[in-house]
Amino acid sequence: MIGKSGIRIIYGDKPKQMVKELLEVIKPEEEIDKDALIGIKPNLVVAKPSSSGATTSPEIVAGLIEYLKAKGRNKIVIMEGSWVGDRTSEAFKVCGYEDLSEKYQVPLIDLQKDKFKTFAIDDLQINICDSVTKVEYLINIPVLKGHCQTNITCALKNMKGCIPNSEKRRFHTMGLHKPIAYLNKLVKQNLIIVDGLNGDLNFEEGGNPIQMNRIIAGKDPVLIDTYAAHLLGFNVNEVPYIGMAEGIGVGTTDLENADIVELNKDNGLRKLTPSRRVQQLSWHIVEDSACSACYGSLIYALERLDVKGILRNLEEKLYIGQGYKQKQYDGIGIGLCTSGFAKCVKGCPPKARDIVDYLESLL
């Protein structure tokens, strides 16, 4: 089992196999009693397939269920409450979870229809669905993606699906950040498995999926979200609920002392057809056999620079891909394969935050 400061990453384009390999390293069954009720909380915010960049891949959940059952952990439920404008029952159907439930005999719990209780913490009162409080081991499976109000959504914000619709509306009137932080003080995540396969560029409801070919696992939602923010090109202070959660003891933002291990390197294929927005950003890129994780980091970085209003100052093309290994150029290279370039952002793959910082220094 990994410790609280551990993060494990696996790359590829076969989610079911990837998550099993990841779990064999983490061995969560070592801390789960055989009779414990295990709750799986995906992100099914809307009724759209995971290829949209909005929702958790059912293949990841299938791999998780198969792994748990193979280890004799059979008391499993899948819980979710979609956003106020959508029905969870429709999301279960469209996103492939009805089929999962039938195949593996795992019940689906619609938290929009669940009863709830009120919990007090400091000066806040928060309503939490009853089914969530009955779970003995909670596995959170968020999607790594952008968000129109909070910049990113990952482990911490995905817990918002554990509250009734009326509470979701109230969270928005409270500015989202503080109640999200305090909700995570009340609801403990035992394991986080992040779907980083193809989260949306900047919108939680999908439409601009960016293929990143990765699954990330850890136990500290604050640490996971700190890592996620950097992957998408943000500093922690640009996602206020992360610092707030750290301040009340939910976890730590200390990535420097984190135990981060990549189990492999990305060699998966790029399968998604780029959206119009991704095509616009890719005008700045000259690619030769780039891995999806590296290319995805660059797209996120270019989006961040555009939002800041400085991408227009970039007059040079950016070179990326395995085709540039051991070659020397005067241009700007992205990733370890372009180490021979006069200017280069190293990393395999680099984080979008590192790319943003480097390009900002040139612009």
Image: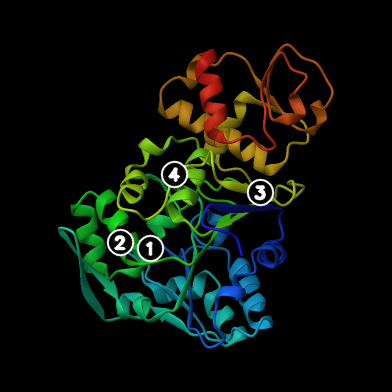
User: Which element type, helix, strand or loop, lies under badge 1?
Assistant: helix
Dot 3 falls on a residue whose secondary structure is strand
Q: Nearer the viewer, residue 45 or 337?
A: 337
Which mark is on residue 159?
1
Which of disc 2 and disc 4 is earlier in sequence?
2
Earlier-in-chain disc, 1 versus 4: 1
Residue 183 disc label:
2
Which quadrant: the N terminus?
Answer: bottom right
Question: Which numbered disc flags the more N-terminal residue, 3 or 1?
Answer: 1
Give how far apart the Cα atoms at labels 3 and 2 are.
29 Å
Q: Are marks 1 and 4 in contact (CB under 8 Å)?
A: no
Q: Select label 3 or label 1 by which is in front.
A: 3
Mark 2 or mark 1, earlier in chain: 1
**Are circles 2 and 1 on residues that touch, CB within 8 Å?**
yes
Three-letter amino acid code of the residue under disc 2: Leu
Please identify, in this view, whether the residue under mark 3 or under mark 2 is nearer the observer: 3
Q: Secondary structure at mark 2?
A: helix
322 or 92, which is in the foreground?
322
Would you say residue 190 is visible in this rendering?
Answer: yes
Give the labeled residue for mark 4: 253
Pointer 1 local density, CA inside 10 Å: few below 14, some 14–19, many at least 20: many
Q: Which residue corresponds to mark 3?
A: 261
The answer to whether residue 148 is seen in the rendering is no
Q: Residue at x 61, y 40 (%)?
A: 296
Q: Nearer the viewer, residue 186 or 60?
A: 186
